[in-house]
């Protein structure tokens, strides 16, 4: 193990430098790319299933494809761009368009035939039920 002396002034300088670099490379400084985007996702788990929620505002269920193969859940699709009106003077153009794809490896046995998906208010909800072998079991400890 190598010990490195901490320099608070040096760390503050690097933080400021990295923050500025991140800002200049972000979408806030330059026009956003409309080729590919990544929707926000929440993945939760309980004793019976994994639950995935994907924010897909402005999309219809027909625009989304879901597949599960080799323990990988794949959510993909495309949000079509609206035609820009050249007569309008755009002040902001931040909405994302184009193809998207998110993949999640599920490290547990899932009952593939029972995977369920719903779409409501721009949120895709996917439930992946766990197989009986993957569910946690409580074992009582006996004292002899």
Image (cartoon, grey):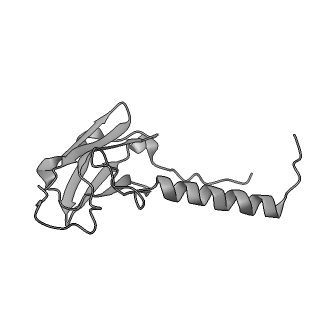
In screen coordinates, is 20 left or right of 34? right
Residue ranking furthest to the top: 70
Give the residue drawn at x 33%, y 41%.
73
Q: Quadrant of residue 19?
A: bottom right
Q: Position of residue 1 (x, y in %)?
A: 87, 40
- Quick check: 64 above or below 91? above
Give the residue drawn at x 26%, y 62%.
93
The foreground one among 140 and 73 is 73
The foreground one among 19 and 56 is 19
Q: Position of residue 132 (x, y in %)?
A: 40, 44
In screen coordinates, is 93 left or right of 7? left
Q: Position of residue 123 (x, y in %)?
A: 25, 61
The foreground one among 40 and 26 is 26
Give the residue drawn at x 70%, y 56%.
14
Give the residue drawn at x 26%, y 60%.
95
Q: For the image shown, how many numbered marks are present on the structure? A: 0
The foreground one among 106 and 14 is 14
- Quick check: 137 above or below 72? below
Q: Position of residue 105 (x, y in %)?
A: 42, 39
Q: Quadrant of residue 114?
A: top left
- Quick check: 76 above or below 139? above
């Amino acid at each position: 193990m190598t010990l490195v002396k901490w320099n608070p002034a040096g760390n503050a300088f690097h933080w400021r430098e990295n923050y500025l670099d991140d800002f200049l490379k972000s979408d806030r400084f330059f026009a956003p790319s409309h080729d590919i985007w990544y929707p926000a996702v929440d993945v939760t788990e309980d004793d019976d299933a994994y639950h995935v929620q994907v924010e897909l505002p402005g999309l219809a269920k027909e625009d989304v494809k879901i597949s599960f193969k080799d323990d990988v859940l794949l959510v993909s699709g495309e949000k079509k761009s609206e035609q820009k009106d050249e007569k309008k003077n755009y002040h902001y153009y931040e909405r994302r368009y184009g193809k998207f794809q998110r993949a999640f490896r599920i490290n547990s046995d899932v009952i593939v035939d029972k995977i369920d998906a719903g779409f409501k208010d721009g949120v895709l909800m996917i439930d992946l039920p766990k197989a009986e072998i993957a569910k946690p079991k409580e074992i009582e400890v006996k004292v002899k």
